[in-house]
Image: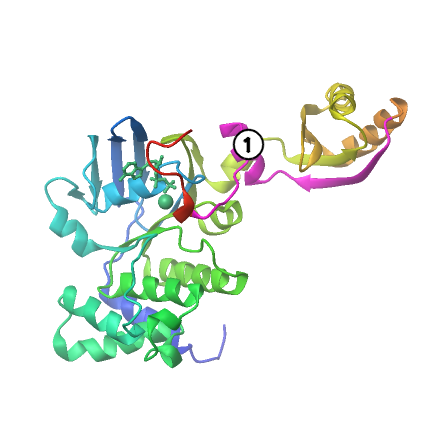
Amino acid sequence: MSTQPPSISERLLSGLAATAPQHDRDAAPAIEAHGLVKHFGDIHAVNGIDLRVRPGQIFGFLGQNGSGKSTTVRMLTTLLRPTSGSARVAGHDIYADDREIRRSIGVALQDAGLDILQTGRELLRLQSRLYNIPRDQIESRVAELLDVVDLTEDADRRIGGYSGGMQRRLDLASALVHSPSIIFLDEPTTGLDPVSRQAVWDYVQHLNRVDGVTFFLTTQYLDEADLLCDEIAILDAGEIVQQGTPDELKATVSNDVIYVQVEGDELIQQRAVNALIQLPNVEDASWDFNEGVAVYTKNGHETLARVVRSLDDESLPFSNLRLARATLDDVFFRATGHRIEPGDPTQSGPPGGSG
Ligand SMILES: Nc1ncnc2c1ncn2[C@@H]1O[C@H](COP(=O)(O)OP(=O)(O)O)[C@@H](O)[C@H]1O
Ligand SMILES: [Mg+2]
C-alpha cells in the first residue's frame, strides 16, 4: 500500500470512473460484428469479419498497410456504410442507431485533420460543445483533459507547432471529452518516437484499468499489440486469419526459436535448413534474408547444442547463434506467409493501383 497521494492524473481518472458506467465481463458485447464486408468497386477492403469485443477489453486489430483496418473502424463508428453484414456497438445497431453509437464512443481516426491554426485548448473546447458538455463545465473539463495527456503547458500554442506525439495525445484527449465507454484508436502510435508511444500506451492502460474503458485499436506494431491488447485479431487482405490472446497466439508456434547466420548463398542456406529440420524436437526450420536460418522448437536449450553439432558435421560455417522466445512476429508470419513491415499509412497505394 502506497502512502503517496494519487497524482493529478490518477485523481482525474478516478473522477472520470465515477461518472462512467461500470463494465461487466458477462455483459453484452461492447462491439459485435457478423460478416462485415466493404467493397470499393473491385477492391475488397473488408471481406467478411466476425468480431466480439467484451466490455473492458483492449482489442487489437493487427495488420499491415492496406489490410482493411481503417475501413473496419470507419464502419464500426458509423462513418462508412458496409456493403453487407451487421454490427452492434455499445448495444446499438450501426445502421439504425448511429446517433446513440456516436454518443457512446470516442474516436481518434488515423487522418485526424486537426486544424493547425487552432490551439489545443480551442480544439478541446470545440469538441466539448459538439458533445453538449454543459457550458459551465467546459473550461474545467478541458483543463482536466489537457492534464491527463500532459499538454497543459502547450495548451495555448497552435496545433501546427505540435510534434507528432503531441498531436496524437491531443487526438486522444478529444476522444475522451464526453467520457465514452468505448474508444476507437486507429494506429494511435504510428510515426511516434518511443517516448511518445510509451505515453500513449500509458494513457490507454490507465483509462482501461482505472475507468474500465473498452478499446478497439488498430496497429501495425507487433510489440504494441503484444503489450497492450487482451485479445488480438490478425487481419490480412480484409480477413481475420487468426485471433486470440497474445499468449494463445504465441502458443500456436513453437516456444523457442534459434536464429543462426549461415555463411553462403541460398543453396547453402537450404542445405542448413534441410539438416536442421531433421533434428529431434525441431518442428520447423526456415530461412529468410533478415533473420538468417530460424529453427522452431519446444526445447531451445537442448536444441541449441544439436544445431551447433549439426552445422559442424555439415561443415557449414556460421555465426550469430542466438536463442529467442517465439514472438508475435513469428505468429504473424505463420498466419499470413509474410512479415509485417510497418509503413506510413498515408503512403498506401491509391485505390485501384497495382497489387
Ligand atoms: N474510399 C476508398 N475508396 C477505394 N478504396 C479504398 C477506400 N478506402 C480504402 N480503400 C482501399 O481498401 C483497402 C483497405 O484500406 P484500409 O482500410 O485503409 O487499410 P489499412 O487501414 O489497414 O491500411 C486498401 O486497398 C485501400 O486502398
Ligand atoms: Mg489505416
Residue 184: image location, x then y, percent: 31, 51
Q: Where does residue 247 sit, x and y in percent of width and height?
A: 52, 40
Ligand 1 positioned in quadrant: top left
Most foreground residue, 151 or 16 = 151
Task: Point out residue 151 in the picture as x, y percentages from the top left corner.
Answer: 38, 74
**Residue beneath the point at 46% across and 51% down:** 228
**Residue at the disc numbered 1:** 333
Based on the picture, tell me whether residue 137 belongs to the magenta stretch.
Answer: no
Q: Is residue 299 positioned above or below 112 on the image?
A: above
For the C terminus, the quadrant is top left
Tell me if residue 58 can be seen.
Answer: no
Taking the image as shown, residue 294 lies to the left or right of residue 131, namely right
Label 1 CB sits under 8 Å from any ligand 1 atom: no
**Can residue 264 be seen by looking at this rendering?**
yes
In magenta, the rendered stretch is: 316-344
Q: What residue type is disc 1 on?
A: Phe
- Image point 31% across, 28% down: which residue? 44
Height in image: 101 above or below 180?
above
- Look at 50% across and 36% down and name the residue there: 248
